Amino acid sequence: LLAADGTVAATIFAEMSALAVRTGAINLGQGFPDVDGPDFVKQAAIRAIEDGRNQYAPGDGVPELRRAVAAHQERHYALAVDPDNEVLVTTGATEALTASILALTGPGDEVLTLEPFYDSHAAAIGMSGATHVTAPLVPGPDGFRLDVEALRAAASSRLRMIVLNSPHNPTGTVLTRDELAAVAAVARERDAIVVTDEVYEHLTFGAEHVPVVTLPGMAERTLTISSSGKTFSFTGWKVGWLHGPAELVTAVRTVKQFLTYTSGAPFQPAIARALDDDETPRALAASLAERRDLLCSGLEAAGFRVTRPAGTYFVMADATDLLPRLGLRDGVELCRRLPELAGVVAIPATAFCRPGSATAQALSAHVRFTFVKREEVLREAVVRLAGLR
Ligand code: PMP
Ligand code: GLN
């Protein structure tokens, strides 16, 4: 968490968004939509404020949201979830992740993530004092796929937890049932807990999202996390949740009560309303598929190599062919110079890797772009990027 000179490091997203503001570049770095979620959800939050739901909510979340989470899991995945004992509302998926890792791991434990990984996963493992081990997602003709042999090799007898993420940020990979079965087998064999970050569960483009908790022997060891930020385009409301076996949820609740105590009261009934609505995420995924194609074609025309992601709102672009022509060394240099060269901001893939790891080296020429921006913004970005050729 500390930079080499001892200062506290800003997250890569904060740093790159600040660069976009400073230079006036189009921000395809930090992943947040430039169109808000539906009006009826905003109105529900306004009503909740006017109705006086402005003091502390219950620590585990308002009952109607916990019930809506359980009903959502039943409707989409045929999961039976007890809203009173098996659901915890959190301040975004970020708090659900951090509280889970802090509650259930510590020094001497190993926690395995995919690599690349979403940055907060590694930061939370660092805060817990556990040792971070990784299994790579390796780029190939079918996109980034899990190296199952490396996963097995990384899972020692000290493995306490596997932190999964599918659909996966930053690669856009949707893990297949076979990949998930390999993860589940390792978890069962090592008696490890699985914490699965499924915030992009509805943002897939033809690929099936399989919650790992639905695999045999996984219900008793899995905490499943999601968030209204991604599904309903309210990233600023910070309403997330997790569900799992009561004793694991109780452990996480114990940590949560000293992180934030409770989460934003009037937003919770509004998100409970949103969770009944399957059409909004479906329409978002359909429009994202078109925006993905627009940006990917533009990146290819600009000289990047891309494989189209099956989910999320991110694409990894390989700049191997472009870098020598631009006289640049790697993706970090490219992202620093991109505002000036093309008026666009992106994130280097190595920000999602352990410094100096084999995966960081393999992905040194990759950069991540988001396509959760309005079509006209993406069109303008594509025109600008064409100038790199
Ligand atoms: N996990 C992943 C994989 C994400 O991409 C993000 C954020 N964008 C989060 C967690 C954080 O979600 P929240 O804003 O709900 O905390
Ligand atoms: N999850 C978003 C991304 O990956 C950003 C969230 C953040 O800034 N922490 O870009």
Image: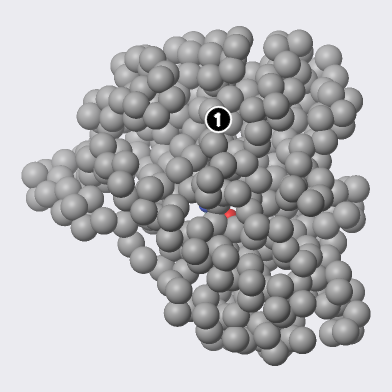
List x then y, in percent, for residue 184.
68, 19
Q: Quadrant of residue 340?
A: bottom right
Residue tagged by mark 1? 210
Residue 203's spot in the image, x, y percent? 48, 48
Relative height, residue 171 to residue 306 (above, below): above
Q: Nearer the viewer, residue 194 or 11?
A: 194
On the rendering, which quadrant does ligand 2 occupy? bottom right
Q: Quadrant of the C terminus?
A: bottom right
Position of residue 264 relative to residue 233, above or below, is: above
Q: Position of residue 149 (x, y in %)?
A: 87, 28
Residue furthest left as drawn: 51
**Front-lying residue, 87 or 371:** 371
Relative to 148, residue 37 above or below: below
Tell me where residue 93 appears, x and y as whole percent.
49, 40
Check disc 1: other Cα within 10 Å, few if <14, some if 14-19, many if 20+. Answer: some
Residue found 76% across the figure and 13% down from its top: 190
Q: Amino acid at mark 1?
A: Val
The mark tally for this picture is: 1
